[in-house]
Amino acid sequence: MKLSRSGYVRLLVAAIACLVAVIVVLSFSHSYSIPGWSELFSLVPADREPITEDYVRFLDVGQGDSILISSNGFNALVDFGNKSDFGTELLDTLYSYNIERLDCIILSHYDNDHVGGGSKIIQAIDTKFALLPELYDRSDNNFSNFQYALENSHTEIHIAKVGTVVNIGDFEITVLAYNKNAENSNDSSVVLMAEIDGCKFLLTGDIGAEVEKQMLADKINVACDVYKASHHGSRNSNTIEFITAAAPKYGVISAGLNNSYGHPHSEVLDNLGAVGAKIYRTDKMGDITFIVENGSLKVETEQ
């Protein structure tokens, strides 16, 4: 049956009347509610392409560590840099990379140059869960601020154990080593291996030579594509034996420009060079990003 023009108009009016009736009935029902326009618009995602890249980004936080791991829109942050600005710059950096949620935070250890910006990040960015060394009482105000912020958030707290695995998108992050009874805080660092599509990133915190020696004695597989130099490139870490076992294609050093420690030490640069690793430094290049594409790595730097 073919409708005339007036028939189409009557049909449209009837349809609108039915729609209005349904809205009125539902609006006054105790069982249903109609969201206002603001609620409807809030369901519409921001006008930007979804982030689908898989990457590890070593953030330039001066004399400290902070590493962003992202896959398919899921994000993990390993360490929070130093306490010089209490995390303000780190927070701005995360926002600049469109990081509005952290599915996981991981802390290698509780020294200021790793936990420094933690309280600011936890207070500002919704965080699902945390993988941490054992919490303990310390008089340091910066640590206390971090612990207070963490315990007053909705973050689930999990204590690191050797063998713990965290999945972030397609990344599998494994705790390779953690000695909670070490004599100093550096040697109690949680050591991680982040792996995706056959690419491995070894994240060593601040472990020293003795921990490296023990890991090799325990026959822990440290072979990797990207090696984050321990303790900002200190000669007290990063032994030739350990670096040889890791055999990285790339070495990353997170250190502050013209820092008072002289990091990275020349011995470490020589050890990385001896295995043919290409060296990247946050003090000279800013943020360093390793993008994983089909099992290969593409490196981008700010400078």
Image (cartoon, rainbow, N blue to C red):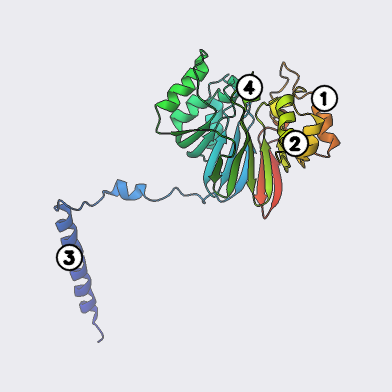
Nearer the observer, 159 or 269: 159
Q: Which residue is mark 3?
A: 17
Q: Which residue is mark 4?
A: 182
Sooner in the amino-acid sequence: mark 2 or mark 1 = 2
Label 3, label 2: how far apart the Cα atoms are? 69 Å
Q: Residues within 10 Å of mark 4 (few under 14, many from 20)?
A: few
Residue type, mark 2 in image: Gly
Residue 145 percent coordinates (x, y):
47, 20
Nearer the observer, 294 or 210: 210
Secondary element at tag 2: strand
Secondary element at tag 3: helix
> Mark 2 or 4, which is nearer the eye?
4
Sooner in the amino-acid sequence: mark 2 or mark 4 = 4
Secondary element at tag 4: loop
Residue type, mark 4 in image: Ala
Going by the picture, which residue comes out furthest to the top? 139
Sooner in the amino-acid sequence: mark 1 or mark 3 = 3
Label 4, label 1: how far apart the Cα atoms are? 27 Å
Sooner in the amino-acid sequence: mark 3 or mark 2 = 3
Label 4, label 3: how far apart the Cα atoms are? 75 Å
Q: Which residue is mark 1?
A: 266
Residue type, mark 3 in image: Ala
Quarter in which the N terminus is drawn: bottom left
Q: Which residue is mark 2?
A: 251
Residue 196 percent coordinates (x, y):
63, 49
